[in-house]
Image (cartoon, grey):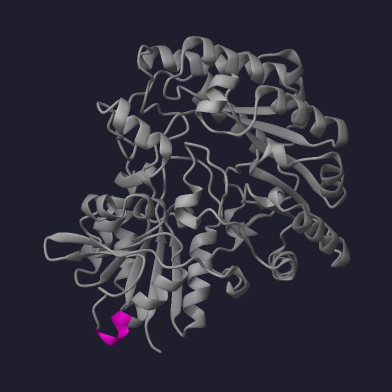
């Protein structure tokens, strides 16, 4: 089957990190398995100017161009999409990723250059679209897509979720982790030199009101076969020089049998790598034996979603834990491992008060955490809290495209944006300006990279000035 396909990852202002895109890696591998040729451009990684990007696109007759679109980065995505349309006026343009999944109709309305949007797991839909384009057929019968029908947007029903036993390894040659060395990592003090993300499963059974994972991958947790994951790690170690992996799935520790098998197989295969779970771990899934097993297999750290410092807010968020549980589990981690532990918190959640924000800051400082992130609240379409806001605060309209870690797009009633910004600065200063924390950071710095990253984080989070939803993001081509 003929046809060349290009995937494009635009830069995003939602985060400064730059890591291999696993989603595109999986889609590219699925397409290759069906006989298609696939190329990939990461605009920030590859350093394209607008002119060089357009010139690059005009060199190939692509079957279609796929562009990943985040709800937090619509302006950047549209700059890329506009350039694609200028370079290839008659090409098919397909968008996928978070925003087409969360809000498919809005995604096509917000991205006028796009023809089709993929909803959720795109592994089957992307193949169906490629075949339809090759054969000159319409797309109206393809599951899990949104498409233009005259002046309207039609949204087709989702397909059943993918059997991960059949999932191929990502196309690592396109997302080579060695090409991301030198860029900021999510995990602040990585132990390795070449780091790669690994996904072991999909789906989330928990009911956190702010979480959108279930929208993409459903409530039922599915895991990739451990042997296939080990094959992937071995490939990364032997072919790409990877010496550290980051598990991207917050559901990793839900299935303890899977964790034990994962750790045992790392030892059996003699895959001596550093690894961590910096994207989040459920505290209520941890016990002493599990922690010791993970550390013995090379795990050196984790991030945990704590979110709030009062039982009232935790209940409103439907976290399923109490402050007492949080304190117990963090103490358990520190008692049985030497892990670095980072806590995720949200300041400015709906119904938040000054008292609950103060409780969150107090808890963060009271816990034996090594790092803390105090994120602003973001209402993702389709989440329970977004429905709550539509019913109780209809005056709030999400300003898609300004949702960085440092950017405030919402403030609770009774607390202005300037005051909420002060609470965020207060939280970072209270946590990081303690002597023991400052000393720990100084002793962990290994070189100029960490020094630059530390300076950037302090500038953006501790000494920042108030930012509001009207602030325009920097352009892609600056």
Magenta stretch mostly in which secondary structure?
A: helix
Out of 101 and 60, give the one closest to the viewer. Answer: 101
Residue 417 in percent (x, y) is at 36, 17
* Residue 453 found in image quarter: top right
Instruction: Examine the rendering and report whether any part of residue 241 can be seen.
Output: yes
Image quadrant holding the C terminus, namely: top left
- Whether residue 133 is in magenta: the answer is yes
Q: Residue at x 57, y 70 (%)?
A: 163
Please name the residue shown 53% across and 23% down the image: 313
In the picture shown, does residue 475 fall above or below 324? below
Q: Where is residue 445 drawn, in percent x and y?
A: 73, 32
Residue plotted at (60% across, 57% down): 221
Residue 257, by quadrant, is: bottom right
Number of numbered tags placed on the structure image: 0
Q: Position of residue 342 (x, y in %)?
A: 67, 32
* 334 lies left or right of 457: right
Q: Is residue 78 above or below residue 341?
A: below
Q: Is residue 168 left or right of residue 189?
A: left
> Is residue 379 rendered magenta in the image?
no
On screen, residue 79 versus residue 343, left or right, reads left
Residue drawn at the location 61% of the way across and 71% of the way down: 169
User: Which quadrant of the figure has residue 467?
Assistant: top left
Front residue of 69/87: it is: 69
Q: Position of residue 98 (x, y in %)?
A: 41, 51
Question: Bounds of the magenta span?
Answer: 132-136
């Amino acid at each position: 089957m003929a046809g060349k396909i290009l995937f494009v990852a635009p830069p995003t202002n939602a985060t400064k990190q730059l890591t291999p895109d696993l989603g595109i890696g999986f889609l590219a591998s699925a397409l290759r398995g069906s006989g298609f040729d696939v190329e990939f451009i990461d605009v920030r990684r590859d350093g394209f100017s607008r002119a060089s990007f357009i010139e690059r696109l005009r060199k190939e007759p692509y079957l279609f161009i796929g562009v990943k679109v985040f709800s937090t980065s619509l302006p950047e995505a549209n700059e890329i999409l506009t350039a694609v349309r200028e370079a290839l006026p008659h090409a098919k343009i397909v968008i996928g990723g978070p925003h087409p999944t969360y809000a498919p109709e809005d995604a096509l309305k917000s991205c006028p250059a796009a023809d089709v949007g993929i909803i959720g797991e795109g592994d089957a839909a992307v193949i169906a679209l490629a075949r339809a384009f090759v054969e000159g057929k319409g797309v109206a019968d393809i599951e899990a897509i949104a498409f233009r029908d005259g002046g309207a947007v039609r949204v087709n029903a989702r397909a059943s979720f993918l059997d991960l036993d059949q999932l191929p390894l990502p196309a690592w040659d396109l997302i080579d982790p060695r090409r991301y060395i030198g860029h900021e990592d999510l995990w602040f003090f990585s132990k390795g030199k070449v780091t790669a993300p690994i996904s072991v499963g999909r789906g989330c059974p928990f009911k956190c009101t702010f979480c959108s994972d279930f929208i993409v991958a459903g409530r039922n947790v599915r895991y990739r076969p451990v042997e296939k994951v080990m094959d992937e790690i071995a490939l990364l170690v032997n072919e790409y020089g990877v010496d550290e992996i980051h598990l991207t799935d917050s559901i990793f520790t839900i299935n303890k049998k899977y964790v034990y098998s994962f750790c045992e197989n790392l030892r059996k295969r003699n895959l001596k790598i550093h690894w961590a779970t910096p994207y989040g771990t459920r505290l209520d899934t941890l016990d002493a034996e599990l922690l010791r097993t993970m550390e013995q297999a090379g795990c050196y750290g984790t991030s945990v979603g704590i979110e709030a410092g009062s039982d009232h807010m935790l209940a409103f968020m439907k976290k399923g834990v109490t402050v007492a549980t949080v304190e117990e589990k963090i103490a358990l981690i520190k008692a049985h491992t030497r892990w670095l532990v980072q806590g995720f918190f949200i300041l400015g959640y709906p119904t938040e008060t000054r008292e609950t924000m103060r409780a969150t800051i107090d808890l963060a400082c009271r816990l034996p955490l090594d790092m803390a992130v105090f994120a602003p609240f973001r209402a993702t379409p389709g989440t329970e809290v977004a429905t709550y806001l539509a019913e109780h605060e209809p005056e709030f309209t999400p300003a898609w495209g300004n949702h960085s870690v440092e950017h405030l797009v919402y403030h609770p009633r009774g607390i202005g944006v300037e005051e909420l910004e002060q609470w965020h600065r207060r939280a970072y200063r209270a946590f990081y300006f303690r002597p023991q924390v400052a000393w720990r950071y100084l002793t962990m710095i290994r070189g100029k990279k960490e020094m630059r990253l530390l300076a950037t984080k302090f500038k953006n989070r501790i000494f920042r000035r108030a930012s509001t939803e009207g602030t325009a993001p920097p352009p892609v081509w600056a």
